[in-house]
Image (spheres, helix red, strand yellow):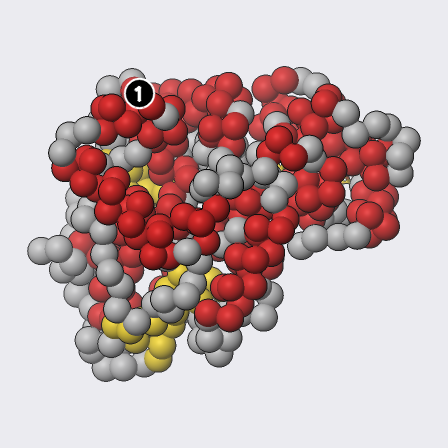
Amino acid sequence: MSLSIKELIVEADRCVACGLCLPHCPTYRKTGSEADSPRGRIQLMRAVAQDILPNNTRFNEHIDLCLSCRSCESACPNNVNYGALVDTTRALFIHKKSILPALAKPFIRYRHLANIASWLLWLTQQAKLDGLLKKISPAAKLLPPIDKPVTWNSMYPATFQRKGAVSLFLGCAGNALDNQTLKASIYVLNKLGFDVHVPSRQTCCGSIARQMGDTDESSKLVAQNQLSFDQTIPVLTTASGCGAGLNDYLPDHKIQDISAFLMTCDWTTIPIKPLNERIYVQDPCTLRNVQKSHQAVYTLLKKIPGSDIQALPGNSQCCGGAGAYMLTQSDMANSLLDDKLTTIKTNSVAILATSNIGCSLHIANGLREKNITVAVLHPIQIIAKQIGYGV
Ligand code: SF4
Ligand code: SF4
């Protein structure tokens, strides 16, 4: 949600400076600086909005270092809307250095260009030229091995006793880098009796543009999505980063994380094969603090007979893979990632379930670099396999 300057000041005034949010803030825990805490940032944002402090480089640095993980919001007894404060501050005050590169915008906005990019990426990997790509761009090291790009049908009909219809939000990173999860989602939903619509005009959720202070771009993307999705049926997201952005900016639509939606479905007629494995669940901040539906992932995976579902210790702390943050603030992102990798190693994790593509790319890249073998999977991929997907 974006605010006016006046609304920003009113919202910031609701912070009573109790400090209860401080221990929950990953950046404050790392730097120990009040200016990198939610309370400190709120004071800074208000002071800049009131022209008491200058909008200078130091202010920009403290705002840029915020992960937008919104752990502070979950901890705040006064329900201060920190997400709206930081989104507004980024839109109004953060210097243009953070604007998305102009070259990247058409690939984010237009699906056919995004599809061309996916094909080029896939062909590059098939030709084993991705090593070269990694030398050209540091961002390329985050790329996992990708599946052949998919040309989506506009609708996938229910395969068993039709019960309703949903729309599937593809997401730009999800579509390009993890179409396995999207294909598995369609399989599960069809099997549970749902037609799955995949509107072709849908585009990026706009969260990365917003996080980088490019409000014009994020508003265009939101408007395009607004026109693309039917408001009368649920719009399901498989990446909680997208889901959180859509939740905030498309309030007229029924946005839901896919695991939460699946908990409302009738599974009684679906045989689920046992899996005698321990599965650790990583809670993405956007699922936990914004969509507040992380518990659905545990309930969903516990449907698998024989499985032992455990929360990854330290789940309340962000992994650092917060959208473009892992590239723009790599020191902090890697420091937070190191904590996760230590936990993964200490607990001998073999399967890690995560519901956000950003977390998945960041953690999987860290594991690759440290030669730690862990299957990092979306929970839908895990349950889809147990009910026959890909078999
Ligand atoms: S959003 Fe996260 S990083 Fe930013 S102030 Fe709140 S807890 Fe700290
Ligand atoms: S918990 Fe809420 S009221 Fe207390 S300092 Fe943090 S933001 Fe302000």
* 225 in relation to 96, above or below: below
Is ligand 1 closer than 8 angstroms to the Cβ of mark 1? no
Residue 220: x and y, percent? 56, 57
Q: Position of residue 361 (x, y in %)?
A: 35, 35
The quadrant of the picture showing ligand 2 is: top right
Q: Residue furthest left?
A: 391
Q: Quadrant of residue 308?
A: top left
Image vertical order of residue 121 relative to residue 291, above or below: above
Q: Which residue matches tag 1?
A: 135
> What residue is shown at x 27% (from left), y 81% (from top)?
162
Residue at coordinates 63% horizontally, 41% vertically from top-left? 213
Q: As rendered, which of 279 and 256 lies closer to the eye? A: 256
Image quarter hosting the C terminus: bottom left
> Can residue 348 be spotted in the picture?
no
Residue at 18%, 54% (x, y): give it. 385
Dot 1 falls on a residue whose secondary structure is: helix
- Horizontally, is 363 left or right of 32 in the view? left
Q: At x 41% / y 56%, what residue is drawn? A: 110
- Residue 353 pos. (x, y %): 32, 42
Q: Nearer the viewer, residue 307 or 280?
A: 280
Q: How dense is the environment of label 1, judged by Cα within 10 Å: few (below 14), some, or many (20 and up)?
A: few
Q: Is residue 74 left or right of residue 185?
A: right
Viewer-closest of 220 and 155: 220
How many numbered marks, from 0 up? 1
Residue 95 can be seen in this image: yes
Find residue 259 and report its image quarter. Answer: bottom left
Closest to the observer, 283 or 323: 323
Mark 1 is on which residue type? Lys
Question: Residue 223 falls in which quadrant of the image?
Answer: bottom right
Q: Quadrant of the N terminus?
A: bottom right
Q: Is residue 137 above or below residue 256?
A: above
